[in-house]
Image (spheres, rainbow, N blue to C red):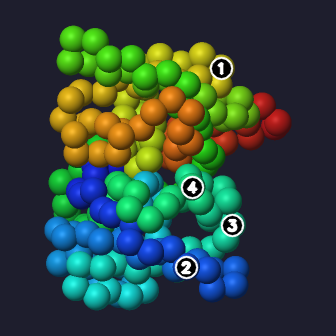
């Protein structure tokens, strides 16, 4: 479980294939200190298990399916990634509950900057449109954000300068694919409503 508050920007140092499993090595100075083998880490919002640790180097095994179904498959050496360690019991929750299980990938359609505010339009498969509500929560690349506007398969989020500085959103451009996790509570409500309609 995570909160969608990025703790550090890591740097991809190596990606190597091991059959159907890939090994992803990420350099991280701060969160590496408190991590142990077997801990969960959100990498651009995708929950991965730490399998090796060498000083500041975090090493994860990633299934080929995960690479295909998330934006992790687009990563290249030296790319910057959002990192968040898993939520500890009793810790402060600054964002919202995030599982690290990516629902789908979206695509940045437009980025607009004016008067210190940035808005980003993201499209996603229309089958997920019932899971997004205006002023609700959404996780993009592991970042907890508030939905500004929504219409069918398009969502707009508004980003403050601080978020652009401390996450990969400041590096994104139109056409980039990004991981999306819809609000967990919204998914349970949608499931309950679906069962009510059937019965």
Q: Nearer the viewer, mark 4 or mark 3?
A: 4
Residue nearest the observer in this picture, 137 or 52: 52
Q: Determine whether, in the image, residue 167 is placed left or right of residue 128.
A: left
Is residue 120 visible to the viewer in this orientation of the structure? yes
C-beta proximity under 8 Å, tags 3 and 2 = no
Q: Distance from label 1 to label 2 (Cα)?
A: 38 Å
Q: Which mark is residue 65?
A: 3
Which residue, given by chain and number where applicable, does mark 4 sit on? 74
Q: Residue furthest right?
A: 198
Rendered image quadrant of residue 51? bottom left
Rendered image quadrant of residue 163? top left
N-term mark: 1 or 2:
2
Which residue, given by chain and number where applicable, does mark 1 sit on? 152
Residue nearest the observer in this picture, 6 or 26: 26
Q: Residues within 10 Å of mark 3 (few under 14, many from 20)?
A: few
N-term mark: 2 or 4:
2
Q: Residues within 10 Å of mark 4 (few under 14, many from 20)?
A: few
C-beta proximity under 8 Å, tags 1 and 3 = no
């Amino acid at each position: 479980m995570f909160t969608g508050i990025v703790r550090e920007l890591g740097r991809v140092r190596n990606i190597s294939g091991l059959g159907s499993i890939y090994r992803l090595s990420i350099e991280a100075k701060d969160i590496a200190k408190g991590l142990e083998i077997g801990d969960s880490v959100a990498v651009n919002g995708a929950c991965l298990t730490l399998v090796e640790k060498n000083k500041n180097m975090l090493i994860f095994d990633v299934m080929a399916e995960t690479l295909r179904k998330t934006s992790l498959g687009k990563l290249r050496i030296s790319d910057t990634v959002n990192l968040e360690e898993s939520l500890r019991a009793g810790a402060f929750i600054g964002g919202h509950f995030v599982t690290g299980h990516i629902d789908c990938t979206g695509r940045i359609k437009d980025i607009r900057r004016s008067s210190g505010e940035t808005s980003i339009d993201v499209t996603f498969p229309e089958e997920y449109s019932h899971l997004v509500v205006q002023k609700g929560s959404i996780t993009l690349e592991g970042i907890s954000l508030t939905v500004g506007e929504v219409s069918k398969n398009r969502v707009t989020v508004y980003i403050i300068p601080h978020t652009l500085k401390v996450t990969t959103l400041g590096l994104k451009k139109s056409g980039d694919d990004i991981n999306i996790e819809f609000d967990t509570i919204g998914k349970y409500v949608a499931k309950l409503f679906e069962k009510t309609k059937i019965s």
